[in-house]
Amino acid sequence: MPAFPTLAEIGLSLVVGVLGSLVASLCWIAVLLRIRPKLEISKVIARSTSIDGRPEFVIKVLNWSKRGAINIRAELFLINESNVSGGAIAEHTRLPLKFDCVFYLGGIDPSTEREVNGWRFVSYDDLDKTWGDKLERRLRFRLVATDEVSGFSRTFTQDFYTRKDTIKDSDFRYGQRTLEVG
């Protein structure tokens, strides 16, 4: 006749099972949290002329991950800081982008030189006039992207502080490994 497990053995089995499941879940979540988009935003803005003759200002983004990034949402702000009693207040003005949502941005592909992992966000707002030379003004470009495998998102932000150091008269070089202008 088989021996029945005691109540202590059943309780120990349940505790070991629950703790093992909890540890496995935490390890899996830790691995997934590391699988997030790895995007880089250019440190400069390229000034060029559009096909219809309007000035256009371009910010290039590269995906350094081997996996694609999905649901990319971008925004460009002009931030004007003013001092008030007790501190500073930042007033944000949203500047329009030609496309502020990108469905998919491919990952870096070592087998090709094609730029499958880059995207150029374009603003037709004349940043020279809008930004001006005031030191209390700066631009902030921010985007949110989701990893296509894990589903986890990450926010990326690039602040541009001075117009003369930021805006360059040229276009970004073509290629999946460069954010250089010229």
Image (cartoon, rainbow, N blue to C red):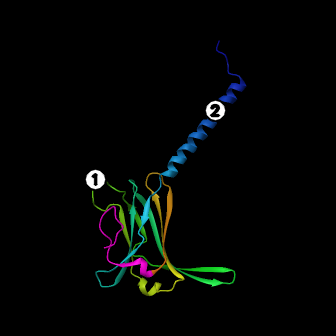
Which labelled disc corresponds to residue 111? 1
In-front residue for pair 96/40: 40
Asked if residue 110 lies in the magenta stretch, the reply is no
Q: What residue do we see at 43% from left, 64% from top?
A: 40
> Helix, strand or loop at disc 2?
helix
> Do we see residue 169 in this rendering?
yes
Relative vertical location of residue 103 with respect to residue 58 in this rendering, above or below:
above
Queried whether the magenta region covers residue 174, the answer comes back as yes
- Pick the residue in front: 23 or 164: 164
* Chief secondary structure of the magenta portion: loop
Q: Secondary structure at mark 1?
A: loop
Please identify, in this view, whether the residue under mark 1 or under mark 2 is nearer the observer.
1
Magenta segment:
163-182
Answer with left or right where residue 18 lies relative to residue 62: right
Residue 16 marker: 2
Please identify the quadrant where the C terminus is shown: bottom left
Q: Would residue 66 be found to the left or right of residue 8 on screen?
A: left
Mark on residue 173? none
Q: Give the residue at x 35% y 83%.
A: 55
